[in-house]
């Protein structure tokens, strides 16, 4: 900065030679030198361009002598308190800074104002970019320019960040350490090759990286920049679009990149007309002043290529089970890497989320928890924070497959479903069936049967076995009388479910998946449209959908073709009923020796749900008497269940235990 100030002082000395007395030079011995020559000035400016802290500023000005002179005079004013009085000799009334007219005179321009207007306007354009809007006083050439706080820090070699964006930005230098990029090695190498080719061509270009939030877009950018020797300045798109003066902020961002020799990274770009307009403006400003690539990190559904000019390198962060498998392999501890494949088949997380799960796992293990697949799945849901609870209700699975009493066929089907979920990566990725089945990979199951036969319990057990969160779709919030609203809400549910690795549960599914009717009016038409939409969305969903219905015959047959499994539930046989009776009492419940399980199973053809109601009521009757549960309590509860359901039963139907009803 002192070298730049020296050049400014020499220019003032040359300008004032022959115009002021020797006494004037004597008043400013630290600044003015009446014996300075033009060749001395050239030498000082040559050194300032290479060794001065102001060199990046001066180089930006290029051959614009007026602009570089104004910067030199500002440097002089900053370092020398006496310079303010001296600059009054060069341009009286210049206030706290320097005017373009004063800089033009100091630069040696001696012509009239008409000759000076064009070069002064060119200088004004460069100076407004570097210094911001000046304090206006009449014509543009009388506007006063000053160094702002960022430039003062920059010229002092302290590299102070610009406070306008320091809170929402970060820098990266090629010598910085970086973590591993699990699952993105090919993308990193491809990006490096493309950047190297375009840099060699000399063309200005932009780089688009798209992917989900926390998918590793900035890490991939930093890795490529490290290979290419690029320093980066990364800023958040949301802050840029939310500020009151985005254009001024863009100028300061680009200026920092120019002066600090960095490439600009704008990250977190989401949909929005205002944001897209600003990005177009930003690219134009950046391409005008910088030859380095502009990196734009977008969400997957943002389309920027039509808005941008020049060469563009476009790359997507990989997704899918194969990529997630590499993430799990990379972040899991060595002894747990065997869990990588089943986790990749069930938990589709981003790189940032997997990393946080691994960190949380370390903490949990240090606190004494057992590291297994269920704990990891639990931690996965803790890092997911994408609004999973709108129009769906989380249900905590309370059962396992061992708890449910179903026939051998249905149990075998449930085991097949579990295997199909856990082996998705092997079948679709390793065996490459994903190419043949671009859609239709949803593991969809209809559970059909009368009330109380175990449909909901089976749903709980299936989700619990897989270690996945179960969410019941709230149909009362989904179905809407207004056209298009039902589809809109269902789309939102499926989109969020995809990101959150949910098991979606539709109870009473025939309410929204009933048979399509003959079109007689507009209501029929739109009802059929809703059904078609649900069919399509289930087929496109890459997850697990469970649908329960009491009336399978009411489900549209078009659904059946798209459903992977159908489980038919019937009333349990005697053997199963006896198992249900025995298993319904918890281990802590005191039981009397008079309970006749064989009689209860043989005499009363009840559903599992009805048996559980009877058992629960009987336990409360016993608790009220502070006794163990006995046949008297069970018969009382059984009688009231029959009465509730309006079943006609005579004393003879209760066999040898009828007398207990009259005690």
Image (cartoon, grey):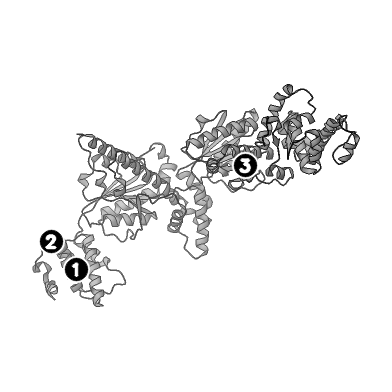
Which image quadrant for residue 402?
A: bottom left
Instruction: Give the side of residue 209 with respect to residue 484, left or right.
Output: right
Q: Which residue is mark 2?
A: 647
From this viewpoint, is residue 235 visible?
yes
Instruction: Give the side of residue 340 with respect to residue 486, left or right.
Output: right
Helix, strand or loop for disc 1? helix
Q: Residue at x 72, y 44 (%)?
A: 152
Whole-angstrom CA distance, mark 2 to mark 3, is 76 Å
Front-most of 274 and 581? 274
Looking at the image, is 507 positioned above or below residue 303? below
Whole-angstrom CA distance, mark 1 to mark 3, is 72 Å
Q: How many marks?
A: 3
Which image quadrant for residue 144?
A: top right
Q: Residue 138, position in %: x, y?
A: 68, 31
Q: Which residue is mark 3?
A: 233
Q: Earlier in the sequence, mark 1 or mark 3?
A: 3
Q: Residue at x 83, y 35 (%)?
A: 44
Which disc is residue 313 wearing? none
Helix, strand or loop for disc 3? strand
- State which quarter of the image contains the C terminus: bottom left
Whole-angstrom CA distance, mark 1 to mark 2, is 14 Å
Front-most of 2 and 544? 2
Which disc is residue 637 wearing? 1
């Amino acid at each position: 900065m002192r070298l730049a100030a020296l050049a400014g002082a020499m220019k003032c000395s040359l300008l004032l030679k022959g115009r002021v007395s020797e006494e004037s030079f004597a008043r400013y011995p630290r600044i003015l030198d009446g014996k300075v020559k033009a060749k001395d000035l050239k030498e000082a400016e040559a050194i300032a361009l290479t060794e001065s802290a102001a060199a990046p500023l001066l180089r930006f000005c290029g051959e614009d002598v007026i602009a570089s002179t104004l910067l030199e005079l500002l440097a002089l004013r900053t370092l020398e308190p006496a310079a303010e009085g001296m600059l009054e000799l060069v341009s009286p009334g210049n206030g706290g800074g320097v005017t373009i007219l004063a800089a033009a005179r100091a630069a040696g321009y001696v012509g009239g104002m008409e000759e000076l207007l064009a070069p002064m306007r060119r200088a004004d354009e460069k100076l407004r970019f570097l210094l911001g809007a000046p304090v206006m006083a009449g014509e543009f050439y009388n506007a006063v320019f000053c160094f702002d706080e960022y430039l003062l820090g920059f010229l002092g070699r302290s590299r102070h960040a610009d406070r306008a964006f320091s809170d929402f930005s970060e820098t990266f230098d090629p010598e910085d350490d970086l973590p591993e990029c699990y699952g993105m090695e090919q993308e990193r190498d491809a990006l490096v090759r493309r950047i190297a080719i375009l840099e060699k061509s000399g063309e200005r270009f932009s780089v688009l990286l798209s992917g989900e939030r926390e998918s590793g877009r900035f890490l991939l950018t930093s890795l490529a920049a490290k290979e290419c020797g690029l320093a980066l300045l990364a800023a958040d798109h949301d802050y840029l679009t939310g500020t009151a003066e985005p254009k001024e902020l863009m100028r300061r961002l680009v200026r920092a990149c120019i002066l600090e020799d960095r490439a600009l990274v704008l990250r977190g770009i989401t949909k929005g007309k205002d944001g897209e307009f600003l990005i177009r403006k930003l690219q134009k400003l950046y391409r005008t002043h910088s030859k380095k690539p502009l990196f734009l990190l977008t969400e997957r559904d943002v389309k920027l290529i039509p808005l941008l000019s020049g060469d563009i390198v476009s790359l997507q962060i990989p997704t899918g089970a194969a990529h997630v498998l590499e993430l799990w392999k990379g972040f899991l501890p060595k002894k747990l890497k065997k869990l990588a494949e089943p986790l990749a088949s069930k938990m589709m997380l981003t790189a940032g989320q997997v990393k946080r799960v691994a960190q949380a796992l370390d903490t949990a293990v240090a606190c004494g928890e057992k590291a297994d697949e269920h704990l990891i799945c639990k931690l996965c849901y803790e890092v997911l924070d994408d609004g999973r609870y709108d129009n769906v209700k989380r249900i905590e699975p309370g059962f396992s497959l061992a708890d449910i009493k179903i026939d051998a066929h249905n149990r075998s089907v449930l085991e097949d479903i579990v295997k199909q979920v856990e082996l998705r990566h092997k079948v679709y990725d390793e065996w490459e069936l994903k190419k043949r089945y671009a859609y239709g990979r949803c593991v969809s199951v209809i559970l059909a049967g009368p009330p109380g036969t175990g449909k909901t319990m089976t749903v709980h057990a299936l989700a619990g076995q897989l270690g996945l969160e179960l969410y019941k779709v709230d149909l009362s919030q989904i179905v809407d009388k207004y056209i298009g609203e039902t589809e809109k809400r269902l789309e939102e549910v499926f989109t969020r479910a995809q990101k959150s690795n949910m098991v979606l549960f539709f109870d009473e599914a025939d309410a929204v998946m009933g048979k399509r009717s003959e079109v007689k009016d507009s209501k029929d038409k739109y009802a059929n449209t809703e059904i078609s939409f649900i069919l399509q969305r289930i087929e496109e969903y890459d997850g697990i959908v469970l649908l329960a219905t009491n009336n399978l015959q009411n489900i549209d047959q078009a659904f059946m073709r798209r459903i992977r499994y159908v489980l038919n539930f019937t009333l349990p046989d005697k053997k199963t009923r006896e198992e249900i009776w025995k298993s319904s009492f918890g281990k802590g419940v005191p039981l009397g020796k008079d309970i006749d399980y064989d009689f209860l199973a043989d005499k009363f053809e009840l559903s599992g749900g009805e048996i559980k109601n009877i058992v629960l009521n009987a336990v409360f009757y016993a608790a009220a008497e502070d006794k163990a549960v006995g046949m008297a309590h069970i018969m009382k509860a059984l009688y009231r269940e029959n009465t509730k359901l309006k079943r006609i039963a005579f004393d003879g139907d209760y066999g040898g235990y009828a007398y207990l009803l009259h005690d």
